[in-house]
Image (spheres, helix red, strand yellow):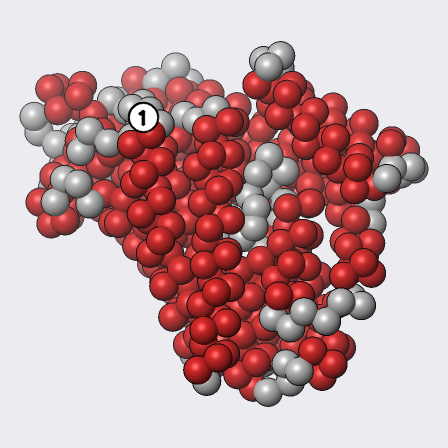
Amino acid sequence: MTFIYLILAVILIIVGITKFKIHPFLCLFAVAVIYGLAVGMPIQKIQESINDGFGKTLGNIGLVIIFGVIIGTFLENTGAALRITHAILNLIGPKRVSWAMALMGYIIGIPVFADSGFVILSTLNKTLTKKANLSIVGTGVALSMGLMATHTMVPPTPGPIAAAGIINAQLGLVILLGLIVSITSLVPVIFYTQYIGRKYFISPETNIEENENTNSHSPTLFKSVLPIIIPLLLIVLKSFNDYKHFLGDGFISESVNFIGSPTIALAIGILLAFLLPKKLEEKMLSSKGWIGKSIIDSAEILMITGAGGIFGKVLQNSGLGDMIGQNFSELNLGLLLPFLLAATIKTAQGSSTIAIITTASIISPMLDKLGLDTEISKALVVLVIGAGSAVISHVNDSFFWVVTQLSGMNVPTGYRSHSLGSALLGISALLICYLIKFFV
C-alpha cells in the first residue's frame, strides 16, 4: 500500500498543479501531509518532517538562491550579462549554447551543489539563450544535466565520495572512471536537449533587449565576469582543501573554508556586483529598487523549493527507503541491482545524495554475492549508484523546482525535458559502466 500511496501522491501533485491550477507550494505541502497520514506516520513525526524538510532545504540553499538572484539582477541591469554574452557567442558560435552550458555545468557541478550551480549560471544562460534565439527549455536542461552528471558521479561531491567510503572503493579510480562515464553519458543528453528545445519553445525572461538599448557604457568583460568567477573559484578552493587538506589546519585553511562556503562566496559575489554600475544609486539598493525586486523574485522559488523539501522529507521518514531495500536485496542482478535500488529511492524521495548513501549502505555487504568485489567492480558500483540517483528528478526533488522555476517551465514541460533528461543520463551512464566492465 505504501507504493500505491506514493504513486497516488505523485499523481495528486501533477493533477493539482496542472489541471486545477493550484499553486505548487500549497499542492506539495498538502500532499505531503496527506501522504504522511495515509501511511500511518505519527502526527509528531509529520510535524518534524515538515519543519526539517522546509528548514534544512532552505537552510542549505535559501540564501544561495537569494544572493544568486541579486547577482543576476545586477548582471542584467548593468549590461554585464550582455558583455559576457558577446564574448561567449563570439567564442563558441550562436548555435552551440546547449553544449557550452552543459560543459559549464559539468565543470561547476564537481565542487558546487547542482542547485547552487544552476542559480549562479541561470542569468548567463538566459542571456545567451536570448541572444541565440533558442528555447530556454533546451539550454536550461543542458545546464541542469551537466550539473547533475558530475554531482552524482564524480567525487569530491558528497554522494559519490560517501559511497566510495562505504563500499571501500579506491577513490582515485572512482574519480578517473567517474570523469569518463559522466562526460560520455552527457553527450546523448545534450542531443536530446537540442531536440526538446526545438519542440517546446520558451523565450527566456530577461532584460537583454532593454540592456542592449540603454546600457551603452556597460562594464568591461573582466569586471563583468568577476561576480560569477570569484565565488566559483572560492568554492572550488574550499572543496579541494576539504579533500586534500593542502593548506593544513591553521588560519589560512580556516579562512579559505569560511570564504569558500557557498553563502559567503556569493555574498562576496554581491560586493563585486556592486562594482558593475558606474555609480551605486538608491534605486539599486532600496527595497523598491534592484535589491528589493530580487528578493521578491526569489520568494516564490524559495517557497516552492522548501515545499519540495517537505515532501521529500516526509517520504524519507515514512521508512520508504528501508522497504525498498528489503524488496530488492534478494535479487541477483549484478550492476543492475545497485542502479535500480538507487533509482527507486531517488524517484521516491527526491534526494540524489540520500539515494546514493542509502543504496551504498544496502549494497556494501552484498558485493561478494553479486560478484562485484574487485577494485574495478567496486568503482563501477559507486558509479552505477550515482547513475541511478539521477533517475528520475521530478516534483519531489528541489532541483526540479529550481530548474523549472528559474527557466519559466510549467510542470508538464519540466517532466518532458528535465525529468526525461535525467532518466536518459542515468541509463546512458549504466550502459557505459557495463561496457567498461565487459572490456576491463
Q: Is residue 170 visible?
A: no
Of residue 26 and residue 188, the one placed in the foreground of this image is: 188
Compared across the picture, whether 420 is left or right of 236 comes to right
Query: What is the x, y in percent for residue 279?
Result: 19, 28
Res 382 → quadrant: bottom right
Q: Secondary structure at mark 1?
A: loop
Q: Which quarter of the rendering shows the N terminus?
A: top right
Query: What is the x, y in percent for residue 148?
Result: 46, 52
Q: Which residue is mark 1?
A: 201
Of residue 57 and residue 398, the one placed in the foreground of this image is: 398
Query: What is the x, y in percent for residue 376?
Result: 53, 83
Vertical comparison of 202 with 105: above or below: above
Q: Is residue 440 visible?
A: yes
Res 199 → quadrant: top left
- Residue shown at 62%/66% (left/top)? 336
Query: What is the x, y in percent for residue 365?
Result: 76, 77
- Residue shown at 46%/28% (left/top)? 413
